[in-house]
Amino acid sequence: NAGVTQTPKFRILKIGQSMTLQCAQDMNHNYMYWYRQDPGMGLKLIYYSVGAGITDKGEVPNGYNVSRSTTEDFPLRLELAAPSQTSVYFCASRDGTGGYEQFFGPGTRLTVL
Amino acid sequence: QQQVKQSPQSLIVQKGGISIINCAYENTAFDYFPWYQQFPGKGPALLIAIRPDVSEKKEGRFTISFNKSAKQFSLHIMDSQPGDSATYFCAARGNYGGSQGNLIFGKGTKLSVKP
């Protein structure tokens, strides 16, 4: 199992550009999450999904969009990138039955200049 | 309140010493308290977790102490090693309407263990 994979690892965007951060998991997990991590600020939930076709906003959704067309994939879309979106983005997943452990991907470091 | 307050922000411990990281919460509707460990350049990974009906859980050198009445929980790392140098996050799982069982994370503690 590859677990949770994220691409790209690094990206530099110009203000106003758009991009999609990719996330995939091969554990057949129902729940998937997108977090952003800023220095000294912990992990903030952007969006989450409880299954294919179902998504909902987290704590900091502004400026982002998601979709969940399959169980495996949960892409995060940034429209009109702003310097405030400079961050490290983590995708995570968990099984919807039983335990609450979230499995994290390796992250995408995004810089908006 | 939907916050988890974590302290200290950073911690330096000598090899072999005890590292202690504390977290406090307000919402009594949290039902699961995990600690995540994150090495530089990596994603967080679950280290140890506890539920509120237990006061202590130990896994190897790592122990969670949980004080339900004080709404506090802490991570103790015994015999700390340089390999334990990482950032540690506490978290709490909401079990109330609208929470969807999502985790709320503390701001993290950067632990450095000096040889």
Image (cartoon, rainbow, N blue to C red):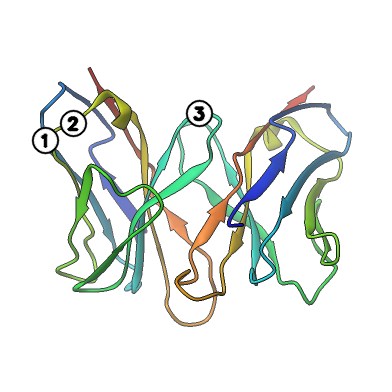
Can you say which quadrant of the picture contains the C terminus of chain B? top right
Where disc 2 sits, the SS reads loop
Q: Are marks 2 and 1 in contact (CB under 8 Å)?
A: yes
Describe residue B75's horizontal placement relative to residue B30 as left or right.
right
- Chain of the residue under label 3: A
**Vertically, is B43 above or below B85?**
below
Q: Identify the residue at image location x=73%, y=49%.
A: B23
Do circles 1 and 3 both sit on a common chain? yes
Dot 3 corresponds to which residue?
A39
Outermost residue toward the left in this view? A17
Dot 1 corresponds to which residue?
A18
- Chain of the residue under label 1: A
Amino acid at the residue labelled 1: Ser
**Vertically, is B78 above or below B30?**
above
3 or 2: tag closer to the N-terminus: 3
- Chain of the residue under label 2: A
Outermost residue toward the front in this view? B1
